[in-house]
Each structure stands twice: as structure tokens, then as C-alpha cells.
Image: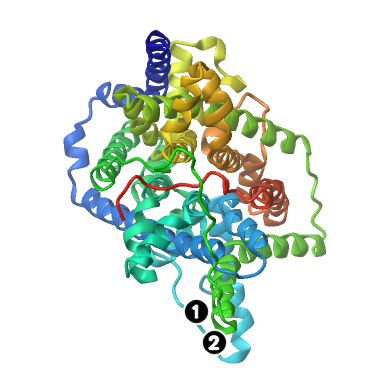
Amino acid sequence: MKINIDIGQTFLSVFSFFIILIISIPLVYLVVRVLGSDGNLLELIFRRRIYEIIIRTLTLVFSVTILSLIIALTLSWIIERTDIPWKKFFTILSVLPIVFPSYVAGMIFVDFLGPKGRVQGWLEPFGVTQLPEIYGFWGSTILLSLLSYPYLFLIIRSSLSRIDANLEEASKILGKNSLKTFFLVTFPLLRPAISSGCILVALYTLSDFGAVSLLRYETFTWAIMTQYESSFNRVVAASFSLVLIFFALLILILDGVIVKPKNYYVSGISGTSRKIKLIKLNLLNKIFSVFIIVLVIFFSVFFPFYGLTYWLIRGAIAGEIINFNWILVWNSISVSFLAAISCVFCSLLISLLIVKYNNKIGILTEKISYLGFGLPGIAIALGVIFVGLKLISPLYQTIALLILGYIILFLPVTIGAIKSSMLQINPHIEEASRSLGFRMWYTTLKITIPIIISGVLAGGILVFMLTMKELPATMILAPLGFETLSTSIWSYSSEAFFAKSAFPSMLLVLISGPFTAYLAFRGYTISDKPVKENLDV
């Protein structure tokens, strides 16, 4: 028995080390590019303007993360813990913002809410001559938060739905009110989910280019993309990317300091518990709760979708002909599915190594994986091409190299979802299986994976949605002639054909709808697998 466990751990360790090598590709490229230049890196970085960009970037990252957490936690709590109507419908719509590319949402917000925008034109007959400024910090914060909160919402709602009622009721029996129970019992149980989601939101904000460029808020990613696109100075851009990696590492270190490792599982072997009793709201509170959800959904889903519909109808009235190649849909779905399957498979093995063995190589793999999520897609793509040409030239200009780039970009999404689900499994359940003579891999396939299936689905669907809208890596790594919905949207938008870009943008949303609906209608819970933290209340 011990030999089998050692063999399993060795295999997982070797696999994780291989993943580390893959994830390190962009870092190797950036270091080689910078060291191979004649420029003075320190003189380039330590300038007053760079300090200002750093402060602006970190301020935006912090603000978007906090606001996204507030939105996600509020929506998750209302949907999971109260008796409001239309829960599954609200769940579907609450996840949909993740499918909108930031540059598409940014164009819609500027077109409608910007100076001399359409909304101001509609309100001028009523005496409104100027809307509040949307450019700069506040506009970028609000827009990115509306696009980012689903990262947290999916994971938090899943964890919140699996908390055992016994813990919270025990706290109330001991004299704690609902507010104290939430902060002393419920919130600590949600820390793995909140931690994983906050990292994703922070790194997504750190790497975003579309929203900040359209809303004129200069961040490090904007500076990097400007160097790549304007002067095509790869040395300066690579230097800035290394600084971005440094701040991504700081985010991960801060997360490790704040969130200490703990076990989050049912303390009893049987795992028996009762479901959480829903809070019955009076009519006024129910209306207010629904209003909060509708308000968020309106600005994050309906408003962008209305903008796309408006562009499409306006173009049709103007006689603009939309010739659409449906092979783009197949290309987008196929590569997104392959990327999701690849990330889920890698994350399952890495999460097993972390949770079951507490292996340092697995923990290191998880931490390093987040670096790819914090870098601009163009830096990842150029790094993959660099290594592809030097070491694996047969894969150059193939789908395999494109999937490799997606794995580097989105692997932490599935690791976060799957690992947080594994942390909530009572180890005694698996030990009972092992004591009956079943091998580790049989136990994993028959017990562990069915229990964590909601986390697996959440991570896989998130990667699918992110891959559908990924632009820079797709444009650079895709084989010649291989186009997707995202590249089509960018091609039309860059030429100001908004009606033509609206159609593939709407298809992105419509294609993603059934996947979010699947999560909602299947409950996205493991209600018969309750969860408790091994704590004294």
C-alpha cells in the first residue's frame, strides 16, 4: 500500500514539474529578451513615470478586487440563502458578464455613456447636458468589476451552497447573531473560494488591456501593449512584463500570508447534515434584494447586450451587409473545448498532489501557474513562439501550440476551482475506501471526482468562456487561416464596422448561455455532500 502511494506521488510530482517548465516559457523568453539587449534595464525601470504607472496599476487592481468581492458575495448570499424567486435565472445572468471581451464592453460603454454619447443625446431634451465622466480610474474600476465578479461568484456560490447548517446553527445556539455567525463561521469557511477568486480577479485586472485603453487609464499592461504595437520595442515591453511578473508574485505571496492552509471538511465520517434553512424575506426586503441583483445584471449583461443589438439593428437599417463565416463558431468552440479539457486534466493531477500529499512541488506549480494569468496574452504568445521555434519546431503554427498557450494563460482558473472543492472532502471517506482494498486511483475516480464534480465543471466552463474571447494569444499562435469569433470581432471593430462586430459578439454570449444554464439547472451544488470546517465553534 505504501509503495503504491509513493509511486502515485512520484508520478504526480514529475507531472507537476513538467507543468512548471511549460508555465515558465514566457518568463524564460522575457529574461532572454532583456538580457540579450544592450539597454540599461535599471535605468529604464526606475523612472518617475514608471512609479506613477505602478501606483495607478496597483490602485486599480485593489479597487476592482474589493468591488468584485462585494458584488459576488452579495449576489451569492442573496441567491443561496434567501427565498427570492427566479434563482436559477438570476444565476445564469450573473455569470454571463464573463463572456464579454473587455474591449467590446469598453466600446459599448464609451459609445453610450461617454461625452456626447448616445445616452446624453437621449437625455438632452430633458435638460441633461453632461453625464458624469466615465474615463479614468472610476470608469475602469466599475467596468472591470462588472466583468470580473463572475470569477468570484461561481466559486463562492458553489462553496456557500455546501456549508453544513449545523455549524451556523451551533453558533446561533451559543448566542451569536446572524452577523457574527457570518463573520465567525461562514466567512472563514469561504476563505479558500474567496482566495482563489480574488487572485483571479486581481491578475485579470493586472493583465487587462481593452478596458483600460478605451477608458484612458494608463496601466502597466497598456504601457506594454503600446511598446509592442507602436514602436515594436520588444526589449522595453519585455522589461515592463518582468515588472508585471514581480507584482503578480507579490499578489501570490500576500495571498499566502493572509490565507493560512486549513482543512475544510465534514468532521464526522458519515457526513450527515441538514440543508441550510432559507431566510424568509418580507415583501419589502425581497423587492430590495431582487433590485440589487437586477441592477448588477442590467449594467453587466443587459446594457452590453443592448449595445450590441443596437449596433446590429442600426447597421441593418443603414443597409450594411453582414457576411458571416460559420466556420468561426466551430473553430471557437473546438479550441475552447480542447483548452478546457486540457486545463481540467492538468489541474486534477496538480490538485491531487497538493491536497492529498501536501507536496511542495504541487504547491509551487499552483503558485507559478498564476503568473501566466497576470501577463498580457501577447507576452505569453511571443514566449510560446520563441520556444516553439527553438525547441519544438514541428508544433509551430499548429493547434497544439495554441492549446499550449491557453494552458499557460488559464490553468490557475481550474486549479483554484478544483483545489477548493478537494479541500472540502472529508479524508475519512477516502480512507474508508482504501481500507476496503481499493487502490488510490480507483478511489479517486469513483469517490473523489464525483464529489468535486461541481468544481471541475466550474473551472472547465470558466476556461471555455475565457478561451472563447481570448484575442492576442489566438491571433499570434493560431495556424495560418485559422480564425475565431474573437479575431473576427477585433477585425471588424478595428475598422469601425460595429454592426459586423456586433453579430459575432452576440454569438459569444448565446453560445456561453447554455453552459451557464447547465450549472444553474443542475444546482451547481453538492447538497448531499455537506461541508464543515474542522473547527471548534
Image: 232 above or below 96:
above
Left or right of 256: which side holds 339? right
Question: How many neighbours does mark 2 have within 10 angstroms: few (below 14), some (14-19), or many (20 or more)?
Answer: few
Q: Residue at x 60, y 41 (%)?
A: 461
Evaluate if marks 1 and 2 touch, with contact meaning CB atoms under 8 Å apart: yes
Q: Mark 1 points at which residue?
A: 131
Spot occupied by residue 369 in the image (x, y as percentages of width and height) = 39, 32
Q: In this view, does 353 lie above or below 94?
A: above
Could you tell me the amino acid type at mark 2? Val
The answer to whether residue 443 is above or below residue 288 is above
Quadrant in the picture for residue 231: top left
Place of residue 496 in the rendered image (x, y in percent of width and height, measured from the top left): 64, 54
Placement of the N terminus among the 4 image quadrants: top left
Which residue was labeled with disc 2? 128
User: Of residues 131 and 82, which is closer to you in this image?
Assistant: 82
What is the crowding at mark 1: few (fewer than 14 residues within 10 Å), some, or many (at least 20)? some
Q: Tell me if I can see residue 483 in this picture.
A: yes
- The residue under the point 58% across, 77% down is 286
Outermost residue to the bottom: 127
The CA span between labels 1 and 2 is: 7 Å
Q: Identify the amino acid type marked 1.
A: Leu
* Residue 215 in view in this figure: no
Q: Quadrant of residue 470?
A: top right
Q: Is mark 1 on a helix, strand or loop?
A: loop
Q: Nearer the viewer, residue 241 or 463?
A: 463
